[in-house]
Image (cartoon, rainbow, N blue to C red):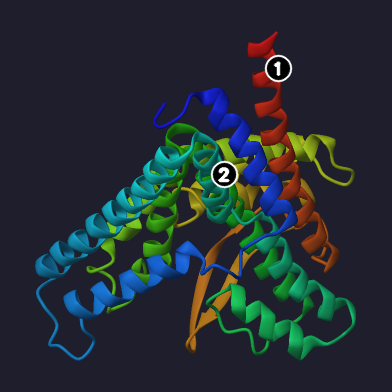
Amino acid sequence: MLFYSWQETAVMLIAAILVDWWIGDPRWPTHPVIWIGRWIGYMESRLHPPEAAPLPPASQRLRGVALTISTLALAFLAMGLILWLSRLIHPWLGYAVNTWFISTTIAVKGLKDAAMQVYDPLRSGRLEEARKYTGYIVGRDTSRLDESEMTRATVETVAENTVDAFVSPIFYALIGAAPLAMLYRAANTLDSMVGYKSDRYLHFGWASARWDDVMNWIPARLTGILLILTAAIRRGCSAVRAAKAVCSFASLHPSPNSGIPESAVAGALGIELGGVNVYHGRTSERARMGWPLRERRMDDILQSVKMLYGVSYFIVGGLLCALCWTLW
């Protein structure tokens, strides 16, 4: 283990999850991801300015690699320095700083709040407001989505981000405390900003997208297992169907990781995810996950959020059991 023993790290992870459940994303001081995003934007303006003539693909990839390495190194080293200085002042300050920064890398409450911003107006029949908030969490055109399609978009977002916003940062924090969790968050932010297969980012964002896939590979599969376990204890969900859906559909997704949580949730709920999306006037067919045993309804948003929290409960419970076992 880096920085701390695994027992110390486990206690701080539990505390960080509790902080996130209670507070969510901090509004003050400025969230670390915002600083990471500013760095990425600054470096992109130097390495890949939009007004410049297009470079050869190999040059774009090389510059993208430079962006990826510099961002990951900066996030890890800056967080490591902050943690080292805080521990130098006092060990308990080090514990507090590590716990706080780990809590900023996870977003269970933030993901729930984003989903509820779609669910609440849907429940009240305010479709235009629901479409607006759906557009905050997905990149597709939401101006004409009906209840079923807004539900699909929200459930897909919650399912996919169960990996990105919770399991992955917890996984890396357990190995390397806040510095490694922050490195993961930097990788995820890189992917969300430049990891697109568009004309502008196809080559420049290649390294960022591939590194995000690598870092999420193990956590995505752990998330699949945890979602199946959660389905086993949730009323109205099927663990058997969730497991079968992962085996049948996950590999159809264009991402090597996102298909696992999406197909698990789709199978557990007995609905179909994926289908036709519209991006800037262009229609795109996304692989379909799960079996349409019934029509999607807005309450599926609540179910997906409860499954997200179920995964977090399993992780907290597992950490507590491991601690009790070592103490016993």
Can you say which quadrant of the picture contains the C terminus? top right
Q: Nearer the viewer, residue 165 or 17?
A: 17
Q: Position of residue 85 (x, y in %)?
A: 38, 45
**Dot 1 alpha-carbon crowd within 10 angstroms: few under 14, some 14 to 19, many 20 or more:** few
Q: Which mark lies nearer to you, 1 or 2? A: 2
- Residue lying at 62% horizontally and 63% vertically, measured from the top left: 25
| Residue 181, placed above or below residue 295 | above
Please give the name of the residue rendered at 23% of the width and 55% of the height, measured from the top-left corner.
69
**75 vs 233: above or below:** below
- Depicted 149 relative to depicted 317: above or below: below
- Write the residue at 29% across / 73% down: 201
Q: Quadrant of the N terminus?
A: top left
Q: Is the residue under label 2 in contact with that under label 1 (CB below 8 Å)?
A: no
Q: Position of residue 229 (x, y in %)?
A: 73, 34
Q: Amino acid at mark 2?
A: Ala
Mark identifier at residue 57: none
Residue drawn at the location 57% of the way across and 23% of the way down: 7
Q: Against 287, is 237 above or below? A: above
The location of residue 196, given as percent across then percent down, is 37, 70
Please give the residue where the numbered disc 1 appears in the rendered image.
324
Q: Which residue is mark 2?
A: 96
Tell me the element at label 2: helix
Numbered disc 1: secondary structure:
helix
**Left or right of 277 on screen, residue 186:** left
Residue extending furthest front?
Answer: 89
What distance separates the C-alpha of mark 1 from that of mark 2? 22 Å
